[in-house]
Amino acid sequence: MRRYWLLFAQTVTIALGIYVVIAALQPAWIGRAPTQMGIGGPGRAVPVLQAPGSGLAPASYRDAAGRAMPAVVNILTSKALRETHPLLKDPFFRRFFGDKTPPQEQMASLGSGVIVSGDGYILTNYHVVEGADEIEVGLADGRKAAASVVGTDPETDLAVIRIKADKLPVIVLGDPEQARVGDVVLAIGNPFGVGQTVTLGIISALGRNNLHINHFENFIQTDAAINFGNSGGALVDTRGNLLGINSAIYSQTGGSVGIGFAIPVSTAKTVLDSIIKHGQVVRGWIGVESQDITPEIADSFGLARDRGAIIAGVVRGGPADRAGMRPGDILLAVQGKKVGSTNDMMNLIAALPPGGKAAMTVMRKNRETTFDVTVGRRPRQTP
């Protein structure tokens, strides 16, 4: 009898041990209900339901946001304005008093930026810092620092500013060439000055151009909410890597309607490197004006193709003119890379280093011809 009792006791002990382990690690296996807890004042307890803490976060992008957010900053700019008293508009009074009204500071812009280097370099939009006399950067950890403009590129609406601070968080650059429509992305910035905010969406389209926002356009379109103040902020993938710089929205009200645009980080990196190296963006130029070939133009001129860029004009004495290119030529390829549109042509030529030679393949009277063009330097465009 004693032996049976010991066997029974051991079995119960083992069963209880297994139950305790399962209840702690996998409560769902035994249908464990949420724990009831009491809250309330003295002498009164209100029963509530408390879910068991599993530590799991299904479908969460907390890790991606956590990696990227520290490197996204708030940018506040100001302009010095001079108020003029009405009497000072009269030349008689100005002779005696002069225009000595002290300047006043006016907040001009609120935007975002992304720290891309431990040396303090920050990428943002040109329109965020345009015309600013003073720039203040607010870091995610609460620090603030004065910033200076390193260089700007109005043609892509990008700017590089710099701060001096220690132990700066730096974002990791992603590869927008690997991005696909439907990929989940996060937009990080400071909309309306409420504080750092993360919004979720997908990539709606790639390679958006002809929007007449910038001179050089190759936008990532997203439905992640982008609002006033998000300009210059980060568009990141689900690993927290930077895919683009949030730049613009399509909206009739000024608020997000699900159509936002970001400049690919590949373009931003090219601009960053050129500004740091030269103080400005250096682009190639051959001195031509072009027009997209449409089916109507192809039919009107009897062209054998309905896509590409037709040379509408050539700058006299420019690189293309000296090489022998003429109006009416259809540009097929630049350095072996096919030209499908005017936008393709502009981007390919802009990427060429000035001073070097580049092979331009054109179609003239249904015959292909290749010209070696000595690339010039694109004149700096004013905003």
Image: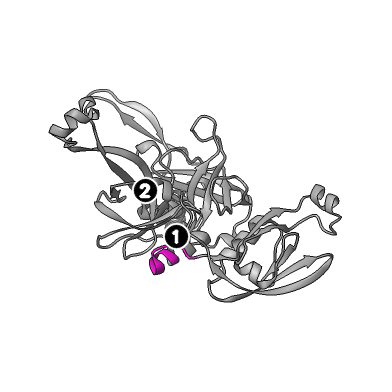
Q: Residues within 10 Å of mark 1 (few under 14, many from 20)?
A: few
Name the kind of residue labelled 1 in the image.
Arg
Residue denoted by label 2:
129
- Along the viewing direction, whichever of 360 and 203 lies nearer the viewer: 360
Which span of residues is magenta-colored? 274-282
Q: Is residue 95 visible to the viewer in this orientation of the structure?
A: yes
Amino acid under disc 2: Val
Q: Earlier in the sequence, mark 2 or mark 1?
A: 1
Q: Position of residue 222 (x, y in %)?
A: 56, 45
The residue under the point 27% across, 37% down is 106
Query: Is the residue 242 above or below the residue 321 in the image?
Result: above
Q: CA distance from mark 2 to mark 1?
A: 86 Å
Q: Is residue 25 above or below residue 269?
A: above
- Relative image position of residue 279 (x, y in whole percent): 38, 64
Which structural element holds mark 2?
Answer: helix
209 vs 130, nearest the viewer = 130
Q: How many marks?
A: 2
Which image quadrant is residue 76 in?
Answer: top left
Residue that badge 1 annotates: 3
Task: Point out the residue furthest to the left here.
Answer: 96
Q: Was residue 278 drawn as part of the magenta stretch in this picture?
A: yes
- Residue 336 numbered tag: none
